[in-house]
Amino acid sequence: MNLLLRRIGTDTRYLLLGFPLAVIAFCLTVTGFSLGMGTVVIWIGVPILGAALMLARGFADLERRMLPEVLGRPVARPRYRPAPQDAGLFRRLVNPMTNGQSWLDLLYGVVNFPVAIVTFCLTVTWWAGAVLGLTYPIYGWILEGIPDNNGLAELLGFGDSALIGVVMTTAVGVLFAITLPLVLRGAALVQSGLSRAMLTVVAGPYERIDGPPFASADWSREHRAAFTA
């Protein structure tokens, strides 16, 4: 039981946190990419594109940090090629554009957005159905007693009895509660599967990530040194 509750908590946290991160990542990376491409002909777009790719890499790393807990196993993190030590300013600015994984990170920010919307809606719907349904016997008698209130039982043609309405709505809540772990696990696997395919399954050198989210000092050091390495 403890393992089941822990899994439900992990999947719920991952899916609920993934939605706002996906929204922010989509807005910032798409805006940066569009602005960079629109001004690249006058060279202003070059540093903007580089910054957008670095921003996408940051969001990709946040996702990679959450994957081991959801998947139950370590994941691979590609080693982004740093700029040469003697590189000039322009070379350092365009360096993120020379890493194929950087473009995958950017694409992931776009592709993951609609997936995160669906999985978030499923999570909220199933949790609401389970909680509101199981607690319906507490407050349902009040709702069933409201004149002209068409409850679930009446809508399904079982009459307007308050008892039948409470029993049926509670039964629906039980159904939501029983299927909640399966729905959460399926949604989490779909979203994490997309992340793993686009952010970790790459050719070339990589490093293993198996610690808790945001726990690696190397992660922050690389981002600080991205334009100065």
Image: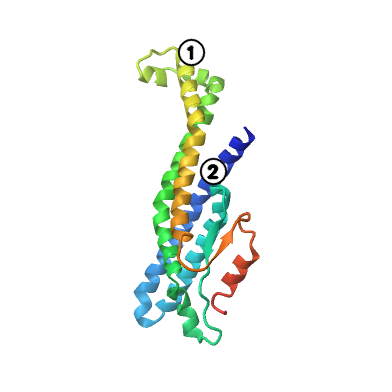
Which residue corresponds to the image point at 50% horizontal and 81% vertical from the top-left? 92
Q: Is residue 212 above or below residue 129?
A: below
Secondary structure of the residue carrying numbered label 2: helix
Q: Label 1, on which residue? A: 163
Closer-to-camera residue (205/176): 205
Residue 171 position in % (x across, y down) = 48, 21
Residue 174 position in % (x across, y down) = 50, 25
Task: Please indicate whether residue 32 sits to the left or right of residue 68 in the image.
Answer: left
Which residue corresponds to the image point at 54% horizontal and 53% vertical from the top-left? 67
Closer-to-camera residue (185/170): 185
Asked if residue 80 shows in the view, the reply is yes
Mark 1 or mark 2: whose residue is earlier in sequence: 2
Residue 22 position in % (x across, y down) = 47, 54
Which residue corresponds to the image point at 47% horizontal and 46% vertical from the top-left? 189
Residue 119 position in % (x across, y down) = 44, 44
Which residue corresponds to the image point at 39% horizontal and 82% vertical from the top-left? 43
Residue type highlighted by circle 2: Asp
Q: Quadrant of the N terminus?
A: top right
Q: Label 2, on which residue? A: 11
Q: Quadrant of the C terminus?
A: bottom right
Residue type highlighted by circle 1: Leu
Which of discs 1 and 2 lies nearer the camera? The answer is: 2
